[in-house]
Image: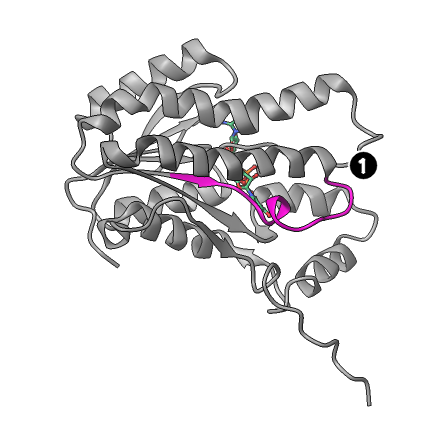
Amino acid sequence: MTGLTGLRALVTGGASGIGLATARALAARGAAVAVLDLEPAGMPEPLFAVKADVSDDTSVRAAVDTAATELGGIDILVNNAGIGAVGTVEDNPDELWHRVLDVNVLGVVRTTRAALPHLRRSPHAAVVNTCSIAATAGLPQRALYSASKGAVLSLTLAMAADHVREGIRVNCVNPGTADTPWVARLLAAADDPEGERSALGARQPMGRLVTAEEVAASIVYLASPAAASVTGTTLAVDGGMQGLRPRPAVRP
Ligand code: NAD
């Protein structure tokens, strides 16, 4: 993995799960890292915490500028903050549709919009969005969440096209079900948490959940100079869930 010494990174939703693993991985490779989150108290050294809600444009602009001042600029933006929703297209009220799209889609818009003036000053500018397998595969009970991540996928491509001539690369990662506090909360709410965990693992050809560190390593790659010719791509980190169709094991 290419070193990131001298680069400055901002990670949204960086206080938990994939975002925290990404912030740690970027810092371990030498980047100066700011974490933007709702309540980013107690972040481990050397991460710099900025409090903001990605659904609030004023708070995002202030947090991005604070991070840029603290770090001396922004070269890498990881748009990772996100929330979930469970249900079919019949199940969720309009208010929840507006809320999830506001956080998951407009959150990416707001943070990127605020960071662009800083990214334009960077000789190595990269944006990585945390998308999802839900953007590319039909998952049951995820109508709203999938719609939000489908929008993130399309937005990634559009932003990559808009900013390629400015030297700003834009890519996304598509995790499968990952072992994070988010999924722990979903499992805790299930009637049979262990059975649900096994079912989610079995849905992925590798037979297990993805780790936050595995997703983080992919984000770090896309953000790094090693990926200097990579833009407008999606990188699946899903245990083979999107691309593979293994035959079910034959019972003796
Ligand atoms: P998580 O709940 O562990 O972490 C999400 C973080 O985002 C939290 O720290 C939370 O406070 C923050 N956040 C939420 N709303 C925010 C807001 N309005 N403003 C600022 N910060 C906010 O979740 P995770 O599993 O690490 O998920 C991170 C990203 O990965 C999300 O975009 C999610 O959609 C995506 N993803 C997760 C999985 C999975 O299985 N865990 C799979 C595919 C994609």
Q: Is residue 252 part of the magenta span, yes or no?
A: no
The quarter holding residue 76 reads top left
| Residue numbers of the magenta segment | 128-142
- Give above or below for 134 relative to 51: below
Q: How crowded is mark 1: few (under 14 residues within 10 Å), some or many (20 or more)?
A: some
Q: Name above or below for residue 206 compared with residue 169.
A: below
Residue 97 in percent (x, y) is at 70, 23
Residue 154 at least partly seen: yes
Is 133 positioned to the left or the right of 167 in the image?
Answer: right
> Which quadrant contains ligand 1?
top right
Look at 52% across and 37% down and name the residue there.
Answer: 154
- Residue 124: x %, y % from top left: 20, 39
Q: In this view, does 113 lie to the left or right of 107?
A: left
* Residue 134 forms part of the magenta stretch: yes
Left or right: residue 112 versus residue 155 is: left
Report the amino acid beneath label 1. Answer: Thr
- Which residue does the image show at 20% across and 47% down from the upper left? 4
Please state, as top left, top right, bottom left or bottom right, where the N terminus lies in the image: bottom left
| Whole-percent x, y for residue 16 in the image | 49, 38
Q: Position of residue 216 (x, y in %)?
A: 41, 50
Secondary structure under the numbered disc 1 in the rendered image: loop
The residue to which callout 1 is attached is 88
**Residue at point 35%, 41% (across, down):** 23
Q: In this view, does 87 lie above or below 209?
A: above
Quadrant, the C terminus = bottom right
Quarter occupied by residue 87 = top right
